[in-house]
Image (cartoon, rainbow, N blue to C red):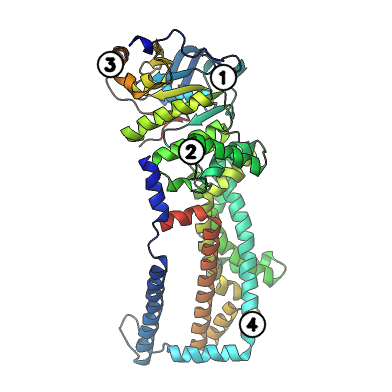
Amino acid sequence: MSSITEAVTISSEKIKPHQLEVERLARRISSIVICLLAWHLASTRHVDLGLITFQNMPSPEEVLAAGWELLQSGKIVSHLTASMSRVFSGYLVAVVTGIALGLIIGRSRTSADTLLPPLEMLRPIPAVAWIPLSILMFPSSELSMIFITFTGALFPILLNTIHGVEAIDPRLIASARSLGTGRSAIFTEVILPAAAPSIFTGLSIGMGTAWFCLVTAEMIAGQFGIGYYTWASYTIQNYAEIVVGMLLIGLLGMTSSIAIRKLGNAMMPWRVSRVNK
Amino acid sequence: MMNLLVESPVAVAQAQIQGQIDIKNLHIRLGHGKHEFEAVQNVSVSIRPGEFVCLLGPSGCGKSTLLGALAGHLAPSSGTIQVDAQPVKGPHSDRGLVFQHHTLFPWRKVIDNVAFGLKMKGLPRAERHERARELLKLVGLAGFEQHYPSQLSGGMQQRVEIARVLINHPRVMLMDEPFGALDAQTRMMMQELLLDVWERIRTTILFITHDIDEALFLADRILVMSPRPGRIIEQIPVVFTRPRHSEIWTSDHFIHLKRRCLELLHLKNADFPLRRLTPLGTAPCP
């Protein structure tokens, strides 16, 4: 009976989670503050380290002013909606194809042999290299841009799904079959949940890489988009605005990646309970 | 001493119990190409419905291979396996399988793990939870329904595993060294619990072990296997009265049987340790 009491203590032994959370939050915020401070000092003092120089770097104040201007102009809404709709459409298509292909490739050797070689060849091609072809392939530039964010998100999702499926303990599948699970139910009842942690890792990374490809994609945009804004600022050498665009992309990428991770935690409570232990 | 021995160990109400196993001239080959070898050689054995049979043998001798073939996860090279006169063609919920380490679904709570087999049979949720609760009570885990498997100890996980198999009322329960990874004290507790549960939910049990004490404590009959290629070299009836308690461990007859098993295992022991086999074939290299 000692094993029973042991498990009871494990579940009731949660050590002041609130205090721990506050501490961690403070550490995270101070890390960002320190980075900002270092940037401020380097740019206002025009630090020159020889190999790397901050002499022409816009300062945080200039960037803030440029950001405020963008906000005041009201154009930010159009930029944001344009970029977000592109990123999310490309991402969504990547999620569906990445997970579906990953499940098939991970489960069957035949489909791995036929599908993986071309995919492996396409994988190292950078998003920039896709620009000309995507313009040729798609009737509208909007679709071309969505395609480029799709290529960015697809591979992390696909590869993590394959890895997750291949890493499943074969005994788990054998047990399920001995418990009367049919071939199609094995997918929904065992393979998908067993691979879910790995799939969510891929989804989170894929979200980041989709934003990563945004500037590239919006190089072909006509008017709106955070990536377009950044690229246009570069062509007219408005450095503060470049940094505003960069930071906006970073912020949006981070926020959506965190959202995906939170969604993953909500959908995988068994993993959360293990972490808290 | 004498009252520990009776004529027929399991003669009570055999009529309605299913789970007659008939294995005839079974050969199983594993591996591919030049790594192919014969894991099980010409095994013929019959097991009565409701009988508790332990398969005893050295590591890598093909005990688990035989179990895997019965479960339907490994195909015989020749020979036949029948359960209740039906040939084994693949895994089925009639033949439950318990591994050495639990295979509970980490994403399902304990109650949903136990109820899983009934979900596959299409029973409504309320009904399967009710049955699962009964089984959890039977294995002494009432109150742990809402835990996740990772929150339980090794012995408790294995009890959930047994409950999950038994909820299907299998004709046969196949157990591959199910208590092998547990500490000695938990193992003894689990052995008593298994016998207690088996008294209530009667099913044929084929139980693999290399622990002679365990085999003698649990079984109606012990099948001793030789090192690879695995053959059954002796059948030893174990006729202690049931319910059994730990005092039989020190009885003269127990020690006599234990000596016999030791002789058989030592006599036939291979000079080198063989790679462990699993019910799913050869184990991956460590």
Q: Nearer the viewer, residue B263 or A207?
A: B263
Query: Residue A204, percent across and down?
Result: 52, 62
- The residue beneath circle 4 is A77
Rounded to the nearest whole Å, what is the CA distance between mark 3 and mark 2?
Answer: 35 Å
Quadrant of the drawing holding the N terminus of chain A: top left
* Chain under callout 4: A
Rounded to the nearest whole Å, what is the CA distance between mark 1 and mark 3?
Answer: 32 Å
Mark 4 vs mark 2: give the one in front: 2
Mark 1 vs mark 4: give the one in front: 1
Give residue B160's mark.
2
Q: Secondary structure at mark 4?
A: helix
Are the numbered discs 4 and 2 placed on the same chain, yes or no?
Answer: no
Q: Secondary structure at mark 3?
A: helix
Location of residue A51 with respect to B214 vertically, above or below: below
Q: Is residue A191 visible to the viewer in this orientation of the structure?
A: yes
- The residue beneath circle 1 is B19
The kind of residue tagged 1 is: Gly
Location of residue A249 with respect to B240 vertically, above or below: below
Rounded to the nearest whole Å, what is the CA distance between mark 4 and mark 3?
Answer: 81 Å
Q: Nearer the viewer, residue A243 or A16?
A: A16
